[in-house]
Image (cartoon, rainbow, N blue to C red):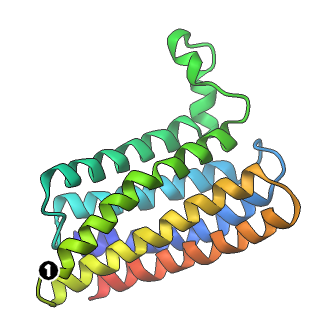
Amino acid sequence: MFVVCHGIAGVTGMFSALFDSVEAAEESAENNWLIPSAVSAIVGGGLQVGANFLVPKDPIQNSAVFGISFATSAIRILCKGIFSGPGQKFLKGKGKLDKLHVENARGVGAVVDAVLVMPALFCTCWHFYELSETESDETRTRAVLDEISNVACYLARISYAVAVNTQAEVKVGAIVVLAVADLLYCGLQVAEASV
């Protein structure tokens, strides 16, 4: 299960590199690439989190930090669904849920996703600290590859937020960083599955 989930997460990272880049380049949040971009992020992130939760390989030992990491990942996947096109259509006119309907769902969702990088990065740094205290073996290598892929994912998420909320040269640079970070994530997840 570990190998299959991380392998598929890696493949979806390759699709994310294409979908996220093309979608971020669009001026309008109403474009045909929004749903494939959101689906690839949800599937890839969900499989990675699921594999690490169901079949952990050298997971975070501190229970509080592990809880923060898991909660942050779950909130991220939930927010991806809420701020996607179908999510926004569902929320519109639903009473109390209508407050989650925003004019620029893509921009707001990207900023929320970028803000969620902060607690996730804290957890990654903590895990690197824990891993530095253990002996090197195959399990530790998988955990290190997973955390490095997380760092690539954080870079992609921040780049996406910049790309969809800015114009001109900054947008182009952010899209290039986004594509490279997504491809790096893809390679690291596949490497983790093959170790």
Relative placement, left or right, of 37 versus 80 is right
- In x, y percent, where is residue 7? 37, 75
Q: Which of 68 and 101 is in front in this view?
A: 68
Residue at 86%, 67% (x, y): give it.
169
Please tell me how many numbered marks the rendered image carries. Answer: 1
x and y percentages locating residue 142 in the rendered image: 25, 81
Q: Mark 1 highlights which residue?
A: 133
Query: Which element carries disc 1, helix, strand or loop?
Result: loop
Q: Which quadrant would the C terminus be assigned to in this image?
A: bottom left
Instruction: Residue at 35% x, 59% y: name it.
Output: 122
Task: Say left or right for 169 vs 131.
Answer: right
Res. 118 image quadrant: bottom left
Circle 1 crowding by C-alpha within 10 Å: few under 14, some 14–19, many from 20: few
Could you tell me which quadrant the N terminus lies in? bottom left
Quadrant in the rendering for residue 83? top right
Q: State the residue in front, 163 or 24.
A: 163
Answer yes or no: is residue 37 visible.
yes
Answer with the quarter of the image where residue 179 lies: bottom right
Q: Where is residue 15 in the image (x, y as percent from the top left)?
A: 58, 69
In the depicted structure, whether residue 61 falls above or below residue 103: below
Q: Residue at horizontal 21%, vertical 58%?
A: 53
| Residue 35 locus on image (x, y percent) | 62, 48
Circle 1: residue type: Glu
- Would residue 32 be visible to someone looking at this image? no
User: Furthest-right residue in view?
Assistant: 168
Q: Quick check: 180 above or below 60? A: below
Name the side, left or right, on which 152 lies relative to 3. right
